[in-house]
Amino acid sequence: MDSNRKGGKGDPEKGQTGPTAARRPAGHSRLRQAVASLDAEDIALARLQAHVRRTETIHAAAPSAATAPRRTTVRLSAALLARLRQRAKRDGVTASEVVEEAVERFLRSR
C-alpha cells in the first residue's frame, strides 16, 4: 500500500487531508458568492432606505415656530399639582396636555 494513500487520505503535499478535501474549494466559493451577494443586497437596501429617509425629510412639512410646542416652567402648589396629575391620569393624557387645554380655555373666555 502506498504511504501517501494510507487510511484513504489524499496527498498531504497537495493540501488534501481527506476524501472531501477536493470538494471544499467549490463549496467554499459558492458560500463566498452567497455571502457576497447577500452583502451587496444589504448595501443596496441600506442605500435605498437612506434615500427614502432623505426624500421624506425634504418633503415633510416642517412645523412653523409658532405651532411647534415650546417648553416653559409653571410653578404650582402641591395640592394643585396633585389635582393636575389626577386629572391627567383620569383622562389618559399628559399633564402638559391638561395645562395646554386649560390655558386655551382661559384665554378664549377673556
Image (cartoon, rainbow, N blue to C red):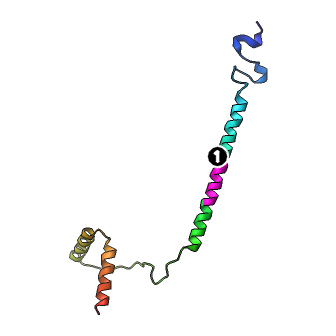
In the image, taking residue 70 as reference, residue 84 lies left or right, namely left
Amino acid at circle 1: Leu
Rendered view: 28 above or below 8: below
Rendered view: 62 above or below 53: below
Examine the image and state in which quarter residue 100 appears.
bottom left
What is the count of numbered marks?
A: 1
Quadrant in which the C terminus is drawn: bottom left
Q: Which residues are magenta?
A: 39-48
- Quick one: label 1, few (<14), some, or many (20+) residues within 10 Å? few
Q: Is residue 29 magenta?
A: no
Residue found at x 30% / y 79%: 75
Towards the viewer: 86 or 19: 19
> Can the viewer see residue 9 in this picture?
yes
Residue found at x 75% / y 24%: 15
Question: Which residue reaches farthest left?
Answer: 79
Task: Look at the magenta stretch and give its main secondary structure.
Answer: helix
Quadrant in which the N terminus is drawn: top right
Residue found at x 61% / y 62%: 50
Q: Position of residue 23 (x, y in %)?
A: 71, 26
Rendered view: 15 above or below 5: below
> Which residue corresponds to mark 1?
38
Q: Is residue 45 magenta?
A: yes
> Can the viewer see residue 74 in this picture?
no
Rendered view: 36 above or below 29: below
Question: Which residue reaches farthest top?
Answer: 1
Q: Position of residue 45 (x, y in %)?
A: 62, 55
Examine the image and state in which quarter residue 94 appears.
bottom left
Q: Position of residue 108 (x, y in %)?
A: 31, 89
Q: Element at badge 1?
A: helix
